[in-house]
Image (tube, helix red, strand yellow):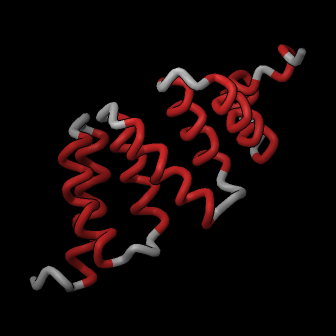
Amino acid sequence: MPENDPQTHVIDFRAAEQLLAARDPRGAVKLLDSVIAAHPENTAARLLRARAFFAAAQLRPAELEFELVLEREPDNAFAHFALARTFERAGRPGQATRHFRLAAALDPKPEYLRAARFDDRP
């Protein structure tokens, strides 16, 4: 199969999901790089690459990818939550709180609500 074949990119995306699940985030990033190079508008691939960067403790690239996803999908609660976790891990609690609260407002999942700490307002 040629590298430009859309099927190749689907296979690479699915393989990247498996690599991330198997705790090989760097391998996932490598596969996703070619998918995103061919399809820069693919938000799902960018979100997966952001998760892989986060899992590999590459916080700045993760932050940039999550922000790009949110530019395209500002109502993506998971992306807000994951960006908040990235900020939290990078020692930026103010930015983390903002995105935890946005995630909880968009989708009141218990995990998002706990992280948002609405009860801790000053």
Query: Up-down: is 101 above or below 4?
Result: above
**Quadrant of the rendered image containing residue 25:** top left
- The quadrant of the picture occupied by the N terminus is bottom left
Q: Position of residue 90 (x, y in %)?
A: 48, 26
Q: Position of residue 82 (x, y in %)?
A: 55, 39
Q: Residue at x 58, y 48 (%)?
A: 79
Query: Up-down: is 97 above or below 117?
Result: below
Q: Residue at x 55, y 52 (%)?
A: 67
Q: Position of residue 35 (x, y in %)?
A: 28, 70
Q: Residue at x 56, y 40 (%)?
A: 83
**Quadrant of the rendered image containing residue 99:** top right
- The quadrant of the picture occupied by the C terminus is top right
Q: Position of residue 77 (x, y in %)?
A: 67, 47
Left or right of 48 in this view: 75:
right
**Quadrant of the rendered image containing residue 46:** bottom left
Q: Residue at x 29, y 35 (%)?
A: 56
Closer-to-camera residue (6/64) = 64
Closer-to-camera residue (36/48) = 36
Query: Up-down: is 21 above or below 1?
Result: above
Q: Residue furthest left?
A: 1
